[in-house]
């Protein structure tokens, strides 16, 4: 990693986004607001030092799980660059998040098969470092220009995320690309620097609502930590996952419902 500044050696903190329930107006972010698709994939930072390595937003090295992306970055991206983006898998015209998850649980032999049958792509949307120069203090508009310059020689599986400053076009993306698995939109200000670990961007996500039943709670009945949710299906109920992340205020809701229904304090 000699070509990358010491303060940017992996794992580096990535910029984050906070959720908004309504798509903001055009001037919601510092400078002109830019809109990008929100991809249904894995956040990935490509570190192109003396060797190429791929890192998750949590600081986990994922290089071995994406051999095709590592090889492409090694061949095309100049040394001393850090590119921020998303690893995605396309399958039958849709983004396939499950195929990404399969990679992280696959052994070496199975991983090679998965990568061959469902190859990954990398969609870049920012740069932290370019040819050894820290770019984080630059405004997003300038970082985007550097990214597009880098990408002039790129080919699949590397690409650059679309971007627009036209809010109406962004709304059309939001509606028209939903069938392809687009999760929503990311909003960035052209004047914003790159602040790792900070929620400086905005995300406007598609929300799907459905009625589920609470099949069980995990943790003390007066302070549940998780809810096991079920989806009614005829006379049966199918497990559809767990709801986690209850703070003190949110814990009061399932607590009151469970106690009103006469649930026991604990189940052995």
Image (tube, helix red, strand yellow):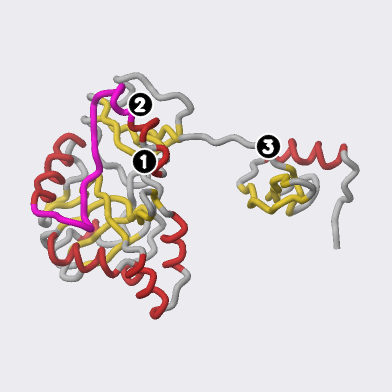
Q: In screen coordinates, is 232 left or right of 175?
A: right
Alpha carbon separation for disc pair 3 and 1: 25 Å
167 in the magenta segment: yes
Residue 66 among magenta residues: no
Mark 1 Cα-neighbour bin, 10 Å: few <14, some 14–19, many ≥20: many
Please tell me which of labels 3 and 1 falls first in the chain. 1
Identify the residue position indicated by label 2 in the image.
171
Magenta segment range? 153-172
Residue shown at 85% from the left, 58% from the top? 267
> Which residue is at the front of the view, 266 or 3?
266
Image coords of residue 51 (percent x, y) = 19, 70
Q: Residue at x 36, y 45 (%)?
A: 39
Disc number for residue 211: 3
Question: Could you say which quadrant of the image residue 199 lies in?
Answer: top left
Marks 3/2: CA distance?
27 Å
Q: Which residue is mark 1?
A: 38
> Picture coordinates of residue 99 (x, y %)?
43, 61
Neighbourhood count class around disc 3 (C-alpha, 10 Å): few under 14, some 14–19, many 20 upward: few
Near-viewer residue (104 or 226): 104
Q: Dot 3: what SS?
A: loop
Q: Secondary structure at mark 2?
A: helix
Quarter holding the N terminus is: bottom left
């Amino acid at each position: 990693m000699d070509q990358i500044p010491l303060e940017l050696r992996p794992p580096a903190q990535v910029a984050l986004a906070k959720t908004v329930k309504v798509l903001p107006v055009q001037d919601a972010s510092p400078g002109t607001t830019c809109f990008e698709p929100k991809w249904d994939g894995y956040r990935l930072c490509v570190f192109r030092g003396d060797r190429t390595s791929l890192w998750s937003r949590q600081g986990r090295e994922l290089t071995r799980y994406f051999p095709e992306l590592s090889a492409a970055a090694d061949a095309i991206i100049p040394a001393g660059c850090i590119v921020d983006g998303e690893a995605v898998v396309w399958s039958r015209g849709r983004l396939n998040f499950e195929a990404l998850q399969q990679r992280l649980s696959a052994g070496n032999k199975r991983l090679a098969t998965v990568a061959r049958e469902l190859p990954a792509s990398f969609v870049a949307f920012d740069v932290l470092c370019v040819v050894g120069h820290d770019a984080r203090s630059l405004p997003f508009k300038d970082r985007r220009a550097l990214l597009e310059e880098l990408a002039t020689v790129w080919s699949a599986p590397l690409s650059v995320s679309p971007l627009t400053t036209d809010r109406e076009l962004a709304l059309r993306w939001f509606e028209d690309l939903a069938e392809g698995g687009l999760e929503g939109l990311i909003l960035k200000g052209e004047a914003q620097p790159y602040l790792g670990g900070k929620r400086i961007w905005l995300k406007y996500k598609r929300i799907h609502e459905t009625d589920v039943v609470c099949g069980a709670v995990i943790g003390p009945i007066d302070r549940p930590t998780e809810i096991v949710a079920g989806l009614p299906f005829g006379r049966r109920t199918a497990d559809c996952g767990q709801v986690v992340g209850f703070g003190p205020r949110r814990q009061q809701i399932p607590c009151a419902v469970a106690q009103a229904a006469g649930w026991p304090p604990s189940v052995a």
